[in-house]
Image (cartoon, helix red, strand yellow):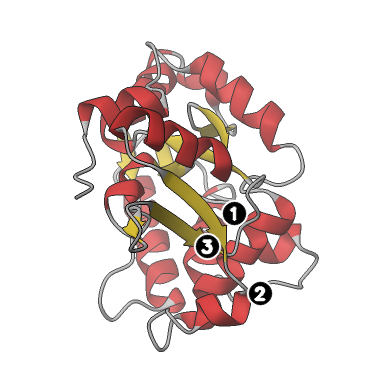
């Protein structure tokens, strides 16, 4: 028996609750004599930053459960998706700036590289690879993304596909923080600072993403292909 598991945030989220639920899922799998766990994990900003960024709870909770699973008497591998292409239809959708152009604003530099994944269309391509050769991937981490895209490349791609002028604007950290929901400001800002300063997957992210992309079963969706299939309604 194989189990694909993931703990996710929701209203009332807390780091402690997510860790407790994740460990309970893993313990239940062991008690049920499952042979394998595929856990959806994420890197630890606190570890990678040397403790400087220690408030990204929704990353740390998944990483802590991963470390717990590694202590259990069960085989496991770890699927670590990048940033969802679907975010460009939600919180990262280009906003009109009043002169006929559109902008995506964030604390990232234009050159910041983000690993993008079509989470709806491509997740199964990595899971299929694991299920086809579970022993080969035991204990391994698959940093799942089509490839790395800079923020400038992302807006250029959106401009090309939509026919609209889309630009990228870097916003000072404290200004951007003011736009974030109360109670989540520091956590979310530190997440962005982590990606900007250390890379989503850390210093070796290019190598990690390229290796994982080679493992996927089937062609991965490029950002341009995803935009063509999921048009942005920029009015």
Q: Which residue is mark 1?
A: 67
Do the numbered discs 2 and 1 sit on residues whose CB atoms are within 8 Å? no
The residue lying toward the viewer, choosing from 71 and 4, is 4
Do the numbered discs 2 and 3 sit on residues whose CB atoms are within 8 Å? no
Quarter containing the N terminus: top left
- What residue is rendered at 31% in x and 32% in y? 163
Q: Secondary structure at mark 2?
A: loop
Q: Which residue is mark 3?
A: 106
How far across and down, in percent of the image, does residue 96 sit?
A: 32, 59
Whether residue 21 is visible, yes or no, is yes
Task: Please tell me whether residue 55 is drawn above or below residue 216 in the rendered image.
Answer: below
Give the crowd class for mark 3: few <14, some 14-19, many >=20 residues within 10 Å.
many
- What residue is rendered at 23% in x and 41% in y? 232
Sequence-earlier tag: 2 or 3: 2
Sequence-earlier tag: 3 or 1: 1
Do the numbered discs 3 and 1 sit on residues whose CB atoms are within 8 Å? no
């Amino acid at each position: 028996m194989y189990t694909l598991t993931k703990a996710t945030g929701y209203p009332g989220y807390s780091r402690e609750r997510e860790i407790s639920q994740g460990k309970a899922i893993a313990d239940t799998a062991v008690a049920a004599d499952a042979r394998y766990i595929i856990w959806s994990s994420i890197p630890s900003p606190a570890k990678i930053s040397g403790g400087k960024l220690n408030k990204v709870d929704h990353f740390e909770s998944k990483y802590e459960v991963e470390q717990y699973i590694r202590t259990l008497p069960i085989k496991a591998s770890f699927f670590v998706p990048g940033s969802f292409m679907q975010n460009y239809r939600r919180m990262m959708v280009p906003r009109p700036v009043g002169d006929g152009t559109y902008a995506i604003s964030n604390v990232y530099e234009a050159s910041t590289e983000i690993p993008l994944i079509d989470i709806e269309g491509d997740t199964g391509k990595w899971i299929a690879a694991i299920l086809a050769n579970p022993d080969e991937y035991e204990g391994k981490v698959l940093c799942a993304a089509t490839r790395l895209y800079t923020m400038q490349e992302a807006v250029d791609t959106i401009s090309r596909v939509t026919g609209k002028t889309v630009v990228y604007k870097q916003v000072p950290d404290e200004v951007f923080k003011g736009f974030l929901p109360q109670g989540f400001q520091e956590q979310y800002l530190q997440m962005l600072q982590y990606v900007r300063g250390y890379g989503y997957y850390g210093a070796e992210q290019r190598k990690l993403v390229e290796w994982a992309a080679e493992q996927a079963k089937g062609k991965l969706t490029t950002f341009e292909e995803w935009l063509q299939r999921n048009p942005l309604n920029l009015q």
